[in-house]
Amino acid sequence: MAAEGHGHSPIEQFEIRELVPINLFGIDASLTNSGAYMLIALGLIFSFLYFSTGGRSLVPTRLQSISEILYEFIASTVRENVGAKGMQFFPLVFSLFIFVLVLNLLGMIPIPGVTFTVTSHIAVTATLALLVISIVIIYGLYKHGIGFFGIFVPSGVPPALLPLLIPIEIISFISRPISLSVRLFANMLAGHIALKIFAGFIGLLLGGGIWALLAPLPLALTVALTALEVLVAVLQAYVFAVLTCIYLSDAVHGAH
Amino acid sequence: MSHAGKGSDKNNGKISHDARAEIKRRSAEIGRRLEAARPTAQEHSQSNGYGHSASHEAMGRALRLSTELIGGIVVGAALGWYLDHYLMPYLFGVKTWPLMFIIFFLLGSAAGMLNVVRSGMKMKTGPSAPARGRAVPDDHSDDN
């Protein structure tokens, strides 16, 4: 795959490049392409929601109904998974969902040399997952006090088994932010690598004399993979939101 | 909305007076079955308006399973390795490698399977399962 200098390396797209060097008190806070993509996503989200809800007509326009559907979608997810009490977390879940969704989809727009998928970096997804799990722990402790740790004690088991089950529950809890972040990051990374590899095959085959006859095969596969990747992009954002809700439900309801 | 719609309406009415009664009966039947299917969903107000198609839900859940298992194993193994190499020698001055690693690897595998079973249970009972679990007070509760 490593055709150097031709831009064919499948992992070249994940390179972080410095755009504007900024040094804040000795900390490298430069604006990178990753940060720029996040700012673009924020701008898109803000302007879309601002303009689409600006009219607030009783019979919604097309744009307004898109944001209403988004709202209803996340609101029903929160209600189903956390309950009515969980609606105080709606802004958090909505922000996470729409941020991840827009970043995932922005990564699907191919611009040669520019396209960058922010969510394919574990630093980003792990930060989001740590934010979620910190909120779960802090809110759980605030709401239930020390009783929050009751979620580590499964109910209805013989006490003799507790020394075995409590470590298992604790490990299960710790694994949550890890599986949450790894899932999103791995899906985006693997999908974009696969896409790039199959797209690279087209060029290789076209340049290979008689093998050019086979070039339409990887082309068709790339088209199909692109559709699949769009699905994965939406689905992973949704999974992230649902899991956030499920974890928050522990904090809201505590040990049963 | 205007003439075309009215015309076709009239046509429908003319052709199928019985069919319309039949449709009404069937829609009432579907409504009754929906009511029976999710009696607890009502307390969550008018939630199910948009979005959730069944396959969408199922695929989202299916994608979760693999990382659930791996997450548990990785966390268990890392915890055991850390205990062996840093915490135990630091606290008690004993070298326990590979004892803690093995124990916590097994515990982590158990935790991973627990994760999978939990999300699998939810997959089996459908999306409104957590709500139903909460609605029944004396149910044995897996913490969602």
Image (cartoon, rainbow, N blue to C red):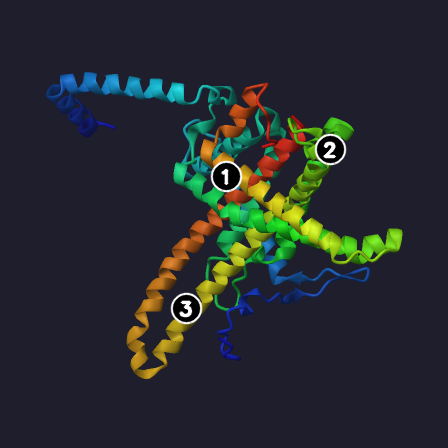
What residue appears at the point 24 percent right and 18 percent down from the top-left corner? B24
- Amino acid at the residue labelled 2: Phe
Disc 2 versus disc 3: distance between alpha carbons? 50 Å
Which quadrant holds residue A12?
Answer: bottom right
Which quadrant holds residue B15?
Answer: top left
- Marks 1,2: beta carbons within 8 A: no
Task: Check the image and report above or below for A28 versus A80.
Answer: below
Most extreme residue toward the front is A160
Same chain, marks 1 and 3? no
Query: Circle 2 sits on which residue?
Result: A149
Tell me residue A101's x, y (percent). Answer: 52, 47
Disc 1 versus disc 3: distance between alpha carbons? 36 Å
Question: Disc number at residue A3?
Answer: none
Tell me residue A215's x, y (percent). Answer: 32, 72
Task: Check the image and report above or below for B53 versus A28.
Answer: above
What residue appears at the point 51 percent right and 57 percent down from the top-left corner? A107
- Marks 2,3: beta carbons within 8 A: no
- Amino acid at the residue labelled 1: Gly
Q: Secondary structure at mark 3?
A: helix
Q: Quadrant of the C terminus of chain A?
A: top right
Task: Check the image and report above or below for A116 versus A4.
Answer: above
Question: Disc number at residue B120?
Answer: 1
Q: Chain of mark 1?
A: B
From the viewer's perspective, is A15 left or right of A7? right
Query: Circle 3 sits on which residue?
Result: A199
Same chain, marks 2 and 3? yes
